[in-house]
Image (cartoon, helix red, strand yellow):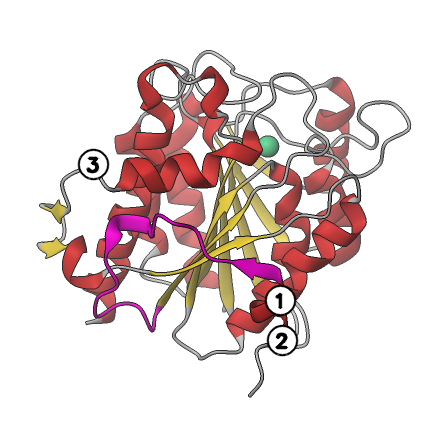
Amino acid sequence: MSLRNLDFYLHKREVFFGGVKGAGADVFKLIGAPLEMTVSFRGGTALAPSKIRDMSLNIESYSLSFSVDFDDIGVDDLGDIEMVPGNLGKSLKRINDVVKEILQLGENVRIIILGGEHTLTLPAFKALNGSEGEGSLLVVADAHLDLRDEYPLGVSISHATVMRRIYEELKPDIVFLGTRAVSKEELIYAKEHGLTFFTPGKFVKGIEYLEKSLKNNDYTSIYLSLDFDVFDPAYAPGVGNPEPGGITLRELYSLLELLADYPLKVIDLVEITPLFDPGNITSILAAKIVEEIVCCLWSKLK
Ligand SMILES: [Mn+2]
C-alpha cells in the first residue's frame, strides 16, 4: 500500500520521541501537529511537539505502575505534519488525511498526536469516524467546553468552537472532564443537547459515569483529547488559556487506566505553549504522560 500522505505531509524531526524505537513501534504511532492558527490568548503551540520530544529524552523511562520500561517499547515517531501557513482548511485536511492513513496501518495501531492547538481534534476525530462508521466515544479532558458557535465573533472554526463543530457534524457521545471555564452560551448548548460534563470536584463521579457508559455501550473506538489546561496551572502553567482549579496528574492516570481497558485508538495532547512554560514543566508533564500511556496500553495488550 502506498503511503502518499505520510510521505508528503510528514517530516522527520532531529529528535525522536524518547530516543528509542522498540517493540511497540508497530503499535504506537506518534505524530506532531504544530497547528497554531486560531489561538486567542497566549501563542506558542506550534513549538510544543519539538519541545516535548526534547524533554522526553531527559526523564526516567521505567513505569512502576505497569512494570514496563518505556525504553523497551518506544513509539514510532513519524515526525510532524507540515502545516500550511495561513491556510487553516488545508492544514486541517492534512491532519485528517494523515490520521486516516495511519489508522489503516493495522487494527492494533494507537495514535498519539502532539499538538498544536485544540482545533486539530476536529480533523483527527473525523478521521477516526471516517469510512469505518460511527460508534466512537469522545472523551475530552479540558477546563473549557469549546462549545461556542463563533470565537472570536465571525470565526466558526477555532480552538474555542472545536467541540461544537464536532458535535454538529458527527453527533458522537462526548464526555467532558475537568470543566470549569464556560460561557452561558455553552452551558445552554450543552443542556439542550444532553452533553455531559464534570467539574474537577466531580472528577471521580465523572470516572464512574464513564465506566458505566463504556460497559453499556459497544463503542468501536475511543478518542481521548487532552487539553493541558485541564490540569491545575500549578502543574501545567505552559498553556494558552490557563484556568485555576484544575485536576492533578493522579486524577488523569485514573482516567487513563479506565480507558486502557477499551479500544482507546487516538490520544491528542493539545494547547501546550513552551513560550509560557517556566522550566519546561508542562512539556515534561506531556512527555511523562505519553510514556505512561504507552506503558499502560502495552501492559494491557500483552
Ligand atoms: Mn480546549
Residue type indicated by callout 3: Asn
> Quick check: 195 above or below 151?
below
Q: Residue at x 20, y 36 (%)?
A: 58
Q: Residue at x 73, y 58 (%)?
A: 93
- Density class for disc 3 (Cα within 10 Å; few <14, some 14-19, many ≥20) is few
Q: Residue 196 appears in which quarter of the rendering?
A: top right
Given contact means CB atoms under 8 Å apart, are the residues at marks 3 and 1 in contact? no
Question: Label for residue 301?
Answer: none
The image position of residue 29, as x and y in percent, is: 41, 63
Distance from label 2 to label 3 (Cα)?
A: 34 Å
Dividing the image into 4 quarters, which one contains the N terminus?
bottom right
Q: Residue at x 55, y 60 (%)?
A: 10
Q: Quadrant of ligand 1?
A: top right
Instruction: Return the residue found at the far right.
Output: 154
Dividing the image into 4 quarters, which one contains the C terminus?
bottom left
Q: Residue 106 appears in which quarter of the rendering?
A: bottom left
The rendered magenta stretch, by its main secondary structure, is classed as loop
Question: Label for residue 4?
Answer: 2
Q: Is residue 197 left or right of residue 260?
A: right
| Most foreground residue, 260 or 87 | 87
**Mark positioned earlier in the residue sequence (2 or 3):** 2
Secondary structure under the numbered disc 3 in the rendered image = loop
Residue type indicated by callout 1: Phe
The image position of residue 259, as x and y in percent, is: 37, 54
Residue pointed to by mark 1: 8
Indicate whether residue 22 is drawn in magenta. yes
